[in-house]
């Protein structure tokens, strides 16, 4: 248990609004934390730094390094802070990889969520805000709408849908209010560009910074709608102020889909680099995935959204200043059968720690990383 900056926050006068943000050292979580602080919340960030960075946590937030799997720590935090709201963004969001890390996926994305839901019920949290994913839809016809029956096709989507269903049952059984968001293909400043399994915009930038070609599964005709973080973080943070949003599900993101090939050209142009790509063997994935946002716009208002070109340029400016990151290797693979060859080859390579480095540091081996969309 590692508690930092916990002095001086008490709710004795009943006037403070205190929110817990899980995954607040990560990409989306840090932006939501920033928005909450701006609106006057006291924010406790819980993050184990497995995918985030302490430097991402805004200075005025209370940072606790720990895992959502640590029931004792969670109980301590809920007793200590009497949270009004829980914003649950902690997740390992690698859809394609989730087929091969099922136990890890369900522990982190499902069981960890249940720990938070239990504590929220027991400590009378006002509202539980959950970031799900359009992965719950599977290969439904695009644009995906909230009235479609979810049919996830990977273990990550199954875990997210299970949490959604659990929240629905907990509202009916215990009166726990919730708001569920299904964002998609989010990118922007503070993204972990060294993650080889997810977030293709960041992967492309990291590859170009390292002088490598951009890697694409199949022919690159897959279509996604890439969403800038500034277009969704304020909505997620302020959602608890909209009573009509309670116990509802919302798609959240941009509207215009692009092919992965088009994205590669846009990223290369913004980086001032030649557009060099390598085509890898196709993998089992949804070909076209983007969603309709009419419901969210009806409740939260219609806003101008960031164009892909503009959003990529902003992120490139940050990425160039930040520099390339070492590409991590997920070593604890549980199933090797039918794994994409480009991933399997990396996992099978023997990796011996250098003097002074632990086994966990082997995840930071560099290499050409196939992109997750």
Image (cartoon, helix red, strand yellow):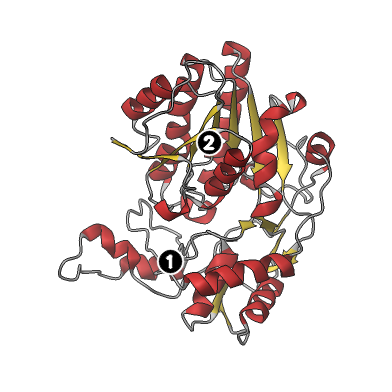
Residue that appears at 50% across and 65% down? 193
Above or below for 112 versus 12:
below
Work out whether residue 253 can be spotted: yes
Residue drawn at the location 38% of the way across and 64% of the way down: 328
Q: Which mark is residue 343?
A: 1
In the displayed structure, 14 sits above or below 353; it is above
- Quarter where residue 267 is shown: bottom right
Residue 23 circle label: none
User: Which quarter of the rendering shows the C terminus?
Assistant: bottom right
Q: Quadrant of the N terminus?
A: top left
Q: Secondary structure at mark 1?
A: helix
Q: Is residue 153 above or below residue 13?
A: below
Q: Position of residue 196 (x, y in %)?
A: 47, 65
- The reply, left or right, for residue 241 in relation to residue 74 is right
Tell me, yes or no, whether the two marked residues, 1 and 2, touch with CB atoms within 8 Å.
no
Q: Do we see residue 137 in this rendering?
A: no
């Amino acid at each position: 248990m590692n508690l930092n900056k916990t002095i001086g926050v008490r709710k004795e006068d009943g006037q403070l609004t205190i929110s817990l943000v899980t995954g607040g050292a990560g990409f989306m979580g840090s932006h939501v934390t920033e928005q909450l602080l701006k609106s006057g919340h006291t924010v406790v960030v819980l993050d184990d730094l497995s995918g985030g960075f302490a430097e991402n946590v805004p200075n005025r937030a209370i940072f606790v390094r720990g895992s959502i799997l640590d029931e004792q720590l969670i109980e301590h935090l809920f007793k200590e802070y009497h949270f009004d709201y829980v914003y649950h963004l902690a997740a390992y969001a690698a859809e394609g990889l989730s087929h091969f890390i099922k136990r890890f996926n369900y522990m982190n994305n499902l069981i960890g969520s249940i720990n938070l839901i239990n504590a929220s019920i027991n400590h009378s949290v006002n509202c539980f805000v959950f970031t799900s994913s359009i992965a719950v839809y599977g290969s439904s016809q695009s644009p995906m709408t909230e009235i479609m029956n979810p049919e996830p096709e990977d273990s990550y989507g199954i875990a997210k849908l299970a949490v959604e269903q659990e929240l629905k049952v907990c509202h009916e059984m215990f009166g726990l209010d919730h708001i569920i968001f299904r964002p998609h293909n989010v990118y922007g400043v503070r993204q972990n560009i060294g993650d080889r399994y997810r977030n293709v915009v960041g992967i492309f930038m990291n590859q170009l910074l390292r002088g490598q070609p951009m890697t694409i599964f199949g022919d690159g005709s897959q279509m996604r709608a890439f969403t800038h973080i500034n277009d969704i973080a304020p909505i997620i943070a302020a959602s608890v102020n909209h009573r009509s949003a309670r116990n509802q599900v919302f798609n959240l993101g941009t509207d215009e889909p692009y092919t992965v090939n088009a994205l590669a050209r846009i990223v290369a142009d913004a980086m001032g680099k030649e557009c060099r790509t390598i085509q890898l063997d196709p993998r089992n994935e949804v070909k076209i995935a983007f969603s309709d946002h009419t419901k969210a716009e009806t409740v939260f208002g219609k806003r101008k959204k960031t164009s892909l070109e503009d959003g990529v340029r902003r992120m490139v400016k940050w990425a160039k200043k930040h520099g390339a990151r070492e590409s991590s290797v997920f070593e604890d693979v549980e199933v090797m059968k039918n794994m994409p060859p480009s991933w399997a080859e990396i996992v099978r390579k023997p990796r011996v720690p250098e003097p002074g480095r632990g086994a966990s540091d082997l995840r930071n081996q560099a290499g050409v990383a196939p992109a997750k969309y």
